Image (spheres, grey):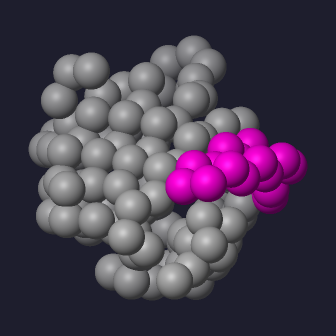
Amino acid sequence: MKSTQELVNEWFDIWNKGNFQELPLAEDFKHISPYGTIEGKSNYMELIESNRDKFLGNRIEMHDEIYEGNRGCVRYNVSKGDFSMNVSEWLYIENDKIKEISAYYNIKGEISEDRKLSPGSYEDA
């Protein structure tokens, strides 16, 4: 059984490598952000697939990590080209899978067309 810290580190390692199909997500995974909620692993994977240019090839710089039991909180900066964003996330683990992520961030100003996600799996939060 992996620790919460090991699973969170695996999560970021997979993103850095671009192998998102290997993300350790529960089938009933939920991702909550200021822009909506994605319910289900398949919907999350579909959103990534249709927005590869926004999700892949980013540089992630970790700032803080806190772990307790089946949850972890991380603060990091993600950047690509002239785009940069500070993110804080709570990750919740169940049965060696990431069950839920609550992400906190804000993209200042108008989101440029090339950074907007394609319509699909997001529902109003």
Q: Dividing the picture into quarters, in which one does residue 44 lie? A: bottom left
Q: Is residue 1 above or below residue 73?
A: below
Magenta segment boundaries in residue numbering: 61-75
Name the residue: 49% across, 68% down.
56
Where is residue 115? Give x, y as percent.
45, 42
Name the residue: 57% across, 16% down.
109
Q: Quadrant of the C terminus?
A: top left
On the question of residue 28 being in view, the answer is yes
Count numbered badges in the picture.
0
Magenta-colored stretch includes residue 70: yes
Magenta-colored stretch includes residue 60: no
Name the residue: 24% across, 42% down.
38
Where is residue 22? Give x, y as percent.
39, 83
Q: Is residue 104 above or below residue 79?
A: above
Horizontally, residue 62 falls left or right of residue 45, namely right
Q: Is residue 16 above or below residue 71?
A: below
Q: Residue furthest right?
A: 63
Where is residue 102? Give x, y as percent.
47, 37
- Predominant SS of the magenta segment: strand
Name the residue: 54% across, 55% down.
70
Horizontally, residue 104 falls left or right of residue 119, namely right
